[in-house]
Image (cartoon, helix red, strand yellow):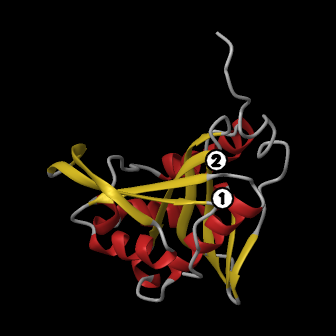
Amino acid sequence: MPLLVEPALPAGSLGAHEQPHLPVRPGLTLRAWREDDAPSVRAAFDCPSIQRWHVRRLDSDDEARAWAAQWADRWRDETAASWAIVDHDDRPVGQVGLRGVLLSEASAQVSYWVLPAARGRGIAAEALAVLTRWSFTRAGLHRLALEHSTANAASCRVAARVGFTEEGVARGSVRHVDGWHDMHLHALLATDPLSSG
């Protein structure tokens, strides 16, 4: 069945290029994940506060390596992308990424987490701001969406700091370990003002 409108972005808009390194600030950069990042990935998924907001866990170093390795294929397939937020020693301190990429609609959802030792320094907001700016100005996306549990006040602060507008609450829409959660919905358009995080 033919579309009435052309896809907003052509195939190859992401996958035909190498996933970029994105500087955040001195001593902080976004780069593609590598398999040797597995110890940091395992530490993140072992963190109780990260587990609280996720529906999966990692049980082995092999699973952590597979998690890190998957992103190269997902970048090439143009379905998702994830960046390690790395410090001046190139060690991951967090993650920021695009999920559910739809080139036809020039849209994606964003995700982020930061390891406990790196929290409280604005890293998530700064990394999200950099990824958002790149998504709109270089990748050509039109809309980024973000959702988090209404109980996750820290994630809400990150979204607000970067300028994501609250669009509503999806009641009982995600099931975590402790039951069903209402989810805050936020979004930002390429035409909206963007904070520096």
| Relative depth, front residue between 185 and 152 | 185
| Kind of residue at disc 2 | Trp
Residue at the left extreme? 179
Q: Is residue 118 left or right of residue 2?
A: left
**Residue at image coords 85%, 42%:** 16
Q: Is residue 42 left or right of residue 18?
A: left
On screen, residue 62 above or below 85: above
Q: Which residue is mark 2?
A: 71
| Label 2 or label 1, whichever comes before in sequence order | 1
Question: Looking at the figure, which quarter contains the N terminus?
Answer: top right
| Kind of residue at disc 1 | Trp
Task: Identify the mark at residue 165; answer none if there is no mark.
Answer: none
Task: Identify the mark at residue 33; answer none if there is no mark.
Answer: 1
- x, y percent for residue 7: 71, 32
CA gap, disc 2 and disc 1: 7 Å
- x, y percent for residue 174: 26, 45
**Callout 1 crowding tier (Cα within 10 Å): few <14, some 14–19, many ≥20:** many
* SS for dot 1: loop
**Residue at image coords 41%, 74%:** 160
Residue at the front extreme? 4
| Relative depth, front residue between 13 and 88 | 13
Answer yes or no: do the residues labelled 2 and 1 have beta carbons within 8 Å? Answer: yes
